[in-house]
Each structure stands twice: as C-alpha cells, then as structure tokens.
Amino acid sequence: MSRARIDIADGAVAVAVTAVLLVTGLSAHRDPADLDVLGYALLTIAGLSLAMARQAPVAVLAMSGSAVLGYQATGFDVPAIGFLVAVYATVRAGQRLVAVAGSILLVLTLPLAMLLAHPDWAVGEAFTHARDALQLAWLVAAGAAGEALRQAERRAEEAERTREETARHRADEERLHIARELHDSLTHQISVIKIQSEAAVHVAHKKGEHVPETLLAIREAGREAARELRATLEALREDVNASRHGLGHVPELVERARATGLDATLTITGENPTLPAALDRTVYRIVQESLTNISRHAHAVTASVRIDYRPDAVIVRVDDDGGLRPGSGAVHGVGLLGMQERVTALGGRLHAGPQPERGFSVHAELPVDPS
C-alpha cells in the first residue's frame, strides 16, 4: 500500500470518528441555547487529530486525551472514541508503555473533569460516568488490536527478509554450480589440447626437430586458458563468500595478509555511516582482491589499506611496494575486471596501475548516493 493511500485511509478514519463525536454531542445538546463552541471544537480536535496517528502517535495520544478531558469538563458526556483509536495507533507504533501510561492517566483524571462540569455529582457517580465514557473493556481491546497488528507486520517483514536471503543463497549456489559445470567441461577439452601440444613439443625436442611457432603458441594458449578458468572459478567462489561479508570484516582481511608475512596496515578516517549492502560488500571485495593480488603477484614487503568515509562518498586505496614499475604494464586479470564492473555498477570510479616510483595502487571512489 502506498503512503498516499495510507494517508487517505487515516484521514477517512479521522473524519468518520469526528462525525460520530459531533453527532453524539449534538444529540446531547439539542437546545440551541446550549451551543458550546469550545466543546464542539474539542470534539473536532479529538477526531481530526487522528489523521496524524501514524506519523506522530504519541502526540496524537496526548492531544486526543486532552481533548477528551476538555469536552467532558465543558459538559459534553461523549464517549472517548477518538482516544481509543489513538491508543490503538500508539500500540501499533510500538509505544506500548506510553499507551498504558496515557490510559491510566486519563482513567484517573477523567472523573475530576466530570466533577468540574457537574459539581452536584458525588465522586462515585463521577467514576461511574467516567467508566461509561471511556469503556475500559474497549480500551483494552484497542491496545490488544494494536499489538496484534504490530506483531503481524513484524512477522510479515521477517518473512520477506527471510525470502530475500533464501533467494540470494539459492542464486549463489546456482552460480557456483554453473561455474563448476563450465569449469569441468572446458577444463577437459582444454586439457586435451594442452596435453597433445605438450606431447608434440616434447617429441620434437627429443628428436632434435624444429618446433613450429604455432605449436608453441597452442601450448601457451592452453596453459593460459587453464589458468584463467581456475582464476574465474576462484573469483566466483570469492564473490559468493564476499556477499556474506562487509566493511566490518576488512580488519580480518588485513590480519590474514599479515599472517602471510606482509607488513599490512589499515587506516580508517571519517565517520562510519550506515552504507547500502551493495556498497558495503563492494568495499570489502576491493580490499580482498587487492590484498590477494599483492600476495600472489607483487612480491611486496609492505601494503597499506586506507578507507576514507566522506559525506558523499567512500574512498578506498590499497598500495604496495612490489616489483612492478611504471611502464612495465599491469596485467588486468579476472579480479581487476570484476572490481571495475562492481565499481562502475555503483556509479563510482576505479584506477588500478603502477605507482610513480615502485609498486601498484588500487584507488576506488564510490558514491554513497548513486542517484
């Protein structure tokens, strides 16, 4: 249901309650001489204030309760229908203690308001009329109805969240299944090509014959294809694992890098906001892939991870002092391509390449609000 429809529904309830209160008030004051503008205004406030019960339930509860006390003090013996609806809305919003405290306060003060309008009444008579006006059984029922609906909404939200997590888990499993099937099928065919080319090269070398360049190219292509297949499957597995991690697990990545002998440091600046799930996972994935590449290829001694939280963006930078020098040409493998696609999908920018002096740098800028 849209927000506009919800507002229209709340407004309709407020108008209906107001109409009931005014009709009841008019029936109790049929003589035009008894017209009390203040009393009718309070009846109107008690009803129309319910239009904001969803947005400000506590304020509406206080306003409705005050209006009930006011029109009862002016002599309008009208049931507190508006207050019952306000109690329902307050409990539905999760403010149970406020609803209970407000109800008790009204129960205790309503007889005093009635005594102001009817000084000739005895205290017991005032409490009797207050009980009739407030209808304690309906008051309890209103609170119970609000709590029941609140619990139903929570269960529906939990069920929706569970469905999303289950669907995501199934998608991850299917992704890995497809990757394994593809890997097994292509690996078999490529292995045949690789073995045949390796055997042909070996035989040629053994006989002292010249090995054709095309045969050597086939052998190297087979080796490279096998490596890329393994890397692709590893990347898919890491993506599935990374989807269950986020920024809170980045220190663990740095600690694991240190365990391999790399002098890795982590620097975080700025205030850590609540980030969208996709952005949170992408930052984790960039750090993970960068540290993995450093361990495998860079032959680095030190590495630094820096995460800078800004109001409009998250800046991620991973530097190392490996052997790659400017002009040597970075190898853009599966991991770097995956990072580029992730960053681009979130509307960000990624630069990965050799540093001016020595080593490799990965620099990503991810907007917090892609719109």
Image (spheres, helix red, strand yellow):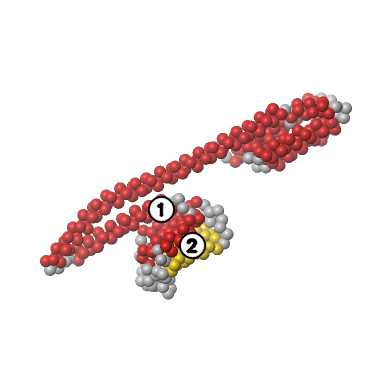
Residue 62 shows up from this direction = yes
Q: Is residue 19 left or right of residue 368?
A: right
* Res 284 label: none
Q: Quadrant of residue 261?
A: bottom left
Task: Inspect the image, locate mark 2, and give the three-letter code of the amino acid beneath it.
Answer: Val
Q: Does dot 2 land on a helix, a strand or a loop?
A: strand
Identity of the residue drawn at 62% across and 35% down: 147
Q: Earlier in the sequence, mark 1 or mark 2?
A: 1
As measured in the structure, the alpha-carbon distance from the residue carrying label 1 to the one carrying label 2 is: 18 Å
Give above or below for 365 relative to 86: below
- Residue that extends furthest to the right in the rendered view of this protein: 120
Q: Position of residue 15 (x, y in %)?
A: 69, 33
Task: Inspect the image, locate mark 1, and give the three-letter code of the amino acid beneath it.
Answer: Asp
Q: Position of residue 342 (x, y in %)?
A: 44, 56
Residue 351 shows up from this direction = no
* Res 239 label: 1
